[in-house]
Image (cartoon, helix red, strand yellow):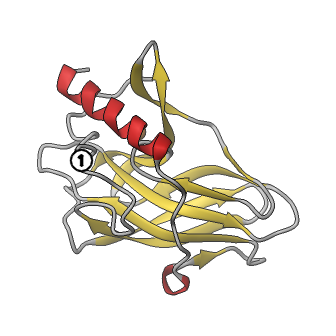
Amino acid sequence: MPKKLRLACMLAAVVAGSSPLVAQADESAAGAGPGGTIEVSDAWARSTSPAARNGAAYMTVSNHGAASDRLLSAATEVAERAELHEHLMQDGVAVMRQVTAVEVESGGEVSFRPGGLHVMLMSLDAPLSVGDSFEVTLSFAEAGAITVEVPVHRSDPHGHEHEGEADSHDAGGHSH
Ligand SMILES: [Cu+2]
């Protein structure tokens, strides 16, 4: 991993660790499962440079049900495959790691955002441009498949992001 990318990741992790969860549910853009217990809101993806092979999508997952649920996988048509990733510190360096599932407790909310959990879009078919949108299908153990529309923005449209996090995925460097 190039040094520049490593620094960007580290900064992103620090910022994510200190910023509060401020995502607000946007009913108009929300996707819900069959039982309506799982709600996916505030979905967005960061625009990518022409040289970028991978992208990332973010969203907020809320569980309005009485039981916990687990997000098991993600799928999209704009990339070869989508993986659930998280950033974490390893020997003082921020790295990305694939996670097998994301638990969403009853009454709880999990935010996917820069520097934290994200849906990694591996091997994009084409760069993601501002103004584009595409679909991501999230598969939950209980709620089943939920498809949401993901608009492409240059940076976080919901505001909890800071300069310096941009393009942390663009160099294609990926540690697991
Ligand atoms: Cu990733």
Q: In this view of the protein, which residue sits in the foreground, 116 or 84?
A: 116
* In the image, farthest residue toward the bottom: 28
Residue at 24% from the left image edge and 47% from the top image edge = 166
For image coordinates 34% across by 55% down, the residue present is 161
x and y percentages locating residue 173 in the rendered image: 27, 28
Q: Is residue 139 above or below residue 6?
A: below
Given the current orientation, which residue lies at the most extreme right position?
66
Residue 13 occupies quadrant? top left
The reply, left or right, for residue 45 in relation to residue 171 is: right
Label 1 neighbour load within 10 Å: few <14, some 14-19, many 20+:
some
Q: Quadrant of residue 16?
A: top left
Q: Nearer the viewer, residue 108 or 50?
A: 108
Q: Callout 1, which amino acid?
A: Ala
- Going 82% across and 69% down the picture, which residue do you hit? 65
Q: As drawn, is 58 to the left or to the right of 39?
A: left
The relative height of residue 117 versus residue 108 in the rendered view (above or below) is above
